[in-house]
Structures are given as C-alpha cells and as structure tokens.
Image (tube, rainbow, N blue to C red):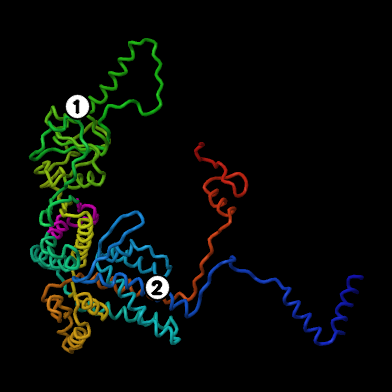
C-alpha cells in the first residue's frame, strides 16, 4: 500500500508542475532509455548511392590495369611481388591473380577472370573489360537516381539477346574430315596465340597444340598434356613428343652402365622402394647367440634381392618407381641390361601408365604381362643441359608432351601460360564445334584494340558500325584489322574463336555487374585488438584450460 501511495504522489506531482517543467522531465526520460546496439564498436558501414558509386569506381580502376594488355598489339605487365618473384605477362587471369586486391567489390572481377580461365582458357582480359565497361555505363544512371534493379533487369535482357545473336552467327565445324578439322582448330589456336608473347611463332605452336590435343582424344584430364621447360635455345627448338617425356631423375652409381635406348620394351611401373634399408618401425630383437646376428643381416639382403629378381623375371626392360631405387638396385639392373629410374614424379608416372597401357604396382609379387606397359621407342636424350627420358610410339596414345625452349625463365613461364590458353581453346572448339569471327563486336573491345595498336579508334568504330548496320547481315563478321589499321572480314582472315569463349565472357561479365549493382550497403567488421580475443582465437585449436589461455589440448603434441 505504501508503494502504491508513493507512485500516486509522484504522478500527482508531475501533473501539478508547470508545462515547461513537464517537457523537461519527458526529455530527460527519453535520454535515459537504453540505446539498441546492433554492431560492434568501430564497425564501418557505408550504404546508399555513394556506396554503389564507390564500388563501380573500384571495379573500373581494376579494369584499367589490364586494359592495355588486350589484343595482338597489347602490352605486357611486369608484376614484382613481396617475395622478389618477377612475372611478365599479358594474360588477364595471371595478372588478376597476382594483384593483391583488397576492395571487396573489386575482388569479384578477379573471380570472373579465374572462372573464365578455368572454363574456356582464353578471354580473361575480355571478361574484365566488359564488366568494367558495363559498370561505367551504369554509373550515370545510378547517379541520376535510377533504381539498380531496373538496370539489372535491363542487363540480363541484353545478355540474352547478345548470346542469341552469337549462336545465330556461329559456324559449325562438325562433319569435317580430320585434316580439315585440324586446319580449322589450328586457326583458332593461332588467334589465341596472336596476342601472346610467342605470337611471332603462332603457326609453329598452333600446329603443335592441335597435334597434342588430338593425341589425347576424348581424355578430359588436362594434365595428360605435359609441358616441360628447358632453358636455352630458341622457340623453334621446342618440340612435341607423342608420348611421355620427363627430366632424368636422381641416379646412383652404376647408372652410366645402363642401356639408354630400347625398341618395343616392356615397362614395369612401381610404387615401392627398391633400396636396402633398416627396419622402419621401432623393432626390438633379442638374441641368445651372437652368431644369429648374421642371419638377420642376411635376411635384409635376401628381401631386397628377392624383389629385384622378381622385377627381372617379369621381362621388363624399363623399371620406373615413384619411390627411391638405391645404388644396389641400380647396379643390379645395369648388370642385367635393364634401365631403371627412381623418384619419378607421380604425375609423370600416371602419364606413362596412361600412354603405355601399364598399371602401377604396389608389390612385385605375381607380376603378369597384363600390368606391363610398352612403347615403340624408349630413349634417353640430351635436351639443352638436361637429360630427358622419352617414351614415344605409345599404343594407348592418350598423352603428349611439349618440351619448351627459350632464353629467359620469365619468357618460358609466359610461353607455358600462352600454350595453356591455346590448349584450352582447341579442346573447347573440339567439344562445342562452333566458331565465330573475332576482332571485336561490342564497342569497348574494338576501341581498346585500336588504342593498344595506336590506331584512330573513332574512325575504325564508325566504319565498323556502318558494316554491322547493313540489313543484309553480310557485315556481321567484320572486325578490326590490326595489320592495316582499318576493318576487315575476320572470318575470311581466319581470326576465329570458339563461340563458347564469347558466350561465357558475356555471361560472366553480366552476372558480375548484376551482383555489384545489387549491393547498396557494405559492413566492415573491426579487427579484434584485445589480447583476450587473440588468445581466445588461438585457443580454439584445442581444448584449453581456462578462458583466453591456450592450454594443451587433446591430441596436441607435448613440447
């Protein structure tokens, strides 16, 4: 009753106060109400039109980095990382991977470049430029107050129309003979290589790439085409092996006495160690008689000799193992006119198995002829300063090896990346079997091609628009002619690309743009600066005792 009376008196007091005093009390009451805190102190939030424009500006800046690398006359970028590694490249995906981009929206362009590279291999610079140009065109509409969802809907509609037009213009290479198909594929590969560092020898490498892709047939694993780099010589010294080639592995004494060439040899592939070694486990043997020690030593020798005898009896003339082949085994095989190599890289061993028809064995017991591989010629050959083991004339024929020569290491690295793009393009052209003319259709591409080549972009674009606008459609395959600074029929000049490159680039760029336009707020959580937070984070690796102290958790090794 006393509490109720007290409340009643307070209420009466409030009503009896002058109006000005009542307002002051009401304001004080509102100030005393607790605030609702949703985000941690120090959290950075940006939203609205300004945030969207900021994201567009960041993506445009990233596109400007790779803009000058587009096309046959494009320049190269030199990237020097914090570890001192130097990379010279004009491949869009390589440059985007090496750039340490921290802006969250701009990282989306890195992702689409990677997806374009993994999906089709080429067009990585194109997809970044398209995304950057789409965003640049959307920026004034955003600033004028157009809702981003309207822009997203328009871009998706335009994307569908563009893809339909590409499919309409595409030309199929189905039904051609093998020689005709190889000629067409070589033109696609040459188009890709024309913008690379090895563009001066594009015909030489294009035919090599086509032969390598045709050699593996329908094999989906790209690692069945091996690329080995040997510094020295010039580009023309590069060659293709219709089979497997790998660098000579570490060898023991006795290796010089082994034969270096065989015709139609049987090949034994192993995943075991052929080396005299002591017991691996912690074994304890108690002897009652010292003379028994010799029998244990003899047993170890008998085990290794038994393995070697079984390898010889299998009839194999070439023995390869992923693990070590010791000096005893090397001399043993040399005495019996057998070639051996240990510590062969796993990837190379699998490629030898695929090419020769052999099977990798984990035991030397019961080796039958069905698990042995074969090839027409095995030889060890000198390439530059390196010795290579080469298996050619393989029956399965599902693998090939390109041996690259060149001067500087950076040049060979860039040549490898260029050949990777060409290989991917030829594989996609074989599977999708439709090609379109290159040379640029959407304004940003021909304009950039002209800028990079030093031509008048305005004049060339006016001529292109005039050709593309012809009602008959005969001007559709026209593009920029890099040699003359004008325009030309790209299809007649054999500037061809698989249609999947264009379709994937437009799709990926459109999706990236729609994703960036749909973001109108960015929330950046602050890093925890407290020692307790860092200690708690480090303690999550095991079950620590106490809070914030990294105790010795279950399963952690004692020090």
Q: Secondary structure at mark 2?
A: helix
Give the residue at mark 2: 58
| 470, above or below 304, in the image | below
Q: CA distance from mark 2 to mark 1?
A: 68 Å
Magenta-drawn segment? 208-228
Numbered tag placed on residue 510 in the rendering: none
| 210, above or below 249, in the image | below
- Quarter of the image for residue 89 reads bottom left
Q: Nearer the viewer, residue 534 or 116?
A: 534
Can you give x and y, in whole percent of width and height, for residue 350 in the image?
A: 23, 45
> Does 115 sit left or right of 321 as displayed?
right
Q: Nearer the viewer, residue 326 or 150?
A: 326
- Quarter of the image for residue 71 reads bottom left
Residue 303 in view of the camera: yes
Can you give x and y, in whole percent of width and height, for residue 536 in the image?
A: 57, 51
Can you give x and y, in whole percent of width and height, for residue 163 in the image?
A: 27, 77
Q: Nearer the viewer, residue 44 or 511?
A: 44
Q: Are marks 2 and 1 in contact (CB under 8 Å)?
A: no
Give the residue at mark 1: 309
Q: Nearer the viewer, residue 498 or 207?
A: 207
**In this figure, what is the number of numbered marks?**
2
Image quarter in which the N terminus is found: bottom right
Residue displayed at 55% across by 67% down: 43
Residue displayed at 43% across by 81% down: 148
């Amino acid at each position: 009753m006393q509490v109720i009376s007290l409340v009643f008196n307070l209420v009466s007091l409030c009503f009896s106060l002058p109006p000005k005093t009542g307002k002051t009390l009401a304001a004080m009451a509102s100030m005393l109400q607790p605030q609702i805190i949703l985000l941690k102190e120090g959290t950075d939030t940006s939203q609205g039109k300004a945030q969207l424009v900021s994201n567009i500006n960041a993506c445009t800046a990233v596109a400007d980095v790779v803009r000058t690398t587009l096309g046959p006359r494009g320049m190269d970028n030199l990237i020097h990382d914090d570890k001192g590694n130097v990379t010279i490249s004009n491949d869009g995906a390589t440059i985007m991977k090496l750039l340490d981009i921290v802006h969250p929206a701009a990282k989306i362009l890195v992702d689409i470049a990677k997806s374009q590279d993994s999906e089709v291999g080429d067009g990585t610079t194109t997809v970044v430029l398209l995304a950057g140009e789409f965003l640049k065109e959307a920026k004034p509409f955003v600033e004028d107050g157009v809702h981003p969802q309207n822009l997203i809907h328009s871009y998706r509609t335009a994307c569908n129309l563009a893809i339909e037009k590409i499919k309409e213009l595409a030309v199929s290479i189905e039904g051609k003979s093998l020689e005709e198909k190889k000629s067409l594929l070589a033109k696609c590969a040459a188009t890709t290589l024309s913008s690379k560092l090895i563009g001066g020898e594009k015909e030489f490498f294009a035919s090599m790439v086509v032969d390598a892709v045709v050699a593996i047939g329908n094999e989906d694993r790209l690692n069945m085409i091996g690329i080995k780099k040997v510094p020295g010589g010039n580009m023309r010294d590069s060659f293709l092996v219709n089979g497997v080639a790998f660098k000579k592995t570490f060898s023991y004494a006795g290796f010089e006495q082994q034969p270096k060439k065989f015709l139609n040899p049987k090949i034994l592939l192993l995943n075991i160690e052929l080396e005299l070694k002591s017991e691996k486990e912690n074994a304890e043997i108690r002897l009652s008689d010292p003379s028994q020690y010799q029998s244990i030593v003899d047993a170890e020798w008998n085990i290794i000799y038994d393995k070697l005898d079984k390898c010889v009896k299998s009839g194999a003339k070439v023995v390869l193992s992923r693990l070590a082949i010791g000096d005893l085994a090397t001399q043993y095989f040399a005495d019996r006119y057998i070639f051996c190599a240990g510590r062969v890289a796993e990837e190379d061993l699998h490629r030898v198995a695929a090419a020769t028809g052999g099977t990798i064995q984990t035991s030397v017991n019961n080796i039958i002829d069905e698990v042995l591989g074969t090839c027409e010629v095995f030889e060890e050959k000198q390439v530059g300063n390196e010795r290579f083991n080469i298996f050619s004339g393989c029956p399965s024929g599902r693998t090939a090896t390109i041996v690259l020569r060149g001067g500087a290491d950076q040049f060979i690295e860039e040549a490898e990346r260029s050949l990777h793009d060409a290989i991917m393009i030829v594989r996609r052209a074989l599977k999708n079997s439709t090609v379109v003319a290159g040379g640029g259709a959407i304004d940003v591409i021909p304009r950039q091609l002209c800028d990079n080549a030093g031509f008048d972009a305005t004049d060339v674009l006016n001529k292109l628009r005039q050709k593309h606008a012809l009602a008959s459609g005969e001007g559709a395959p026209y593009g920029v002619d890099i040699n003359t600074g004008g325009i030309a029929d790209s299809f007649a000049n054999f500037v061809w690309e698989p249609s999947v490159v264009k379709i994937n680039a437009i799709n990926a760029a459109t999706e990236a743009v729609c994703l960036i336009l749909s973001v109108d707020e960015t929330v950046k959580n602050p890093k925890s600066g407290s020692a307790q937070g860092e200690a708690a984070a480090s303690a999550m690796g095991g079950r620590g005792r106490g809070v914030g102290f990294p105790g010795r958790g279950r399963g952690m090794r004692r020090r």
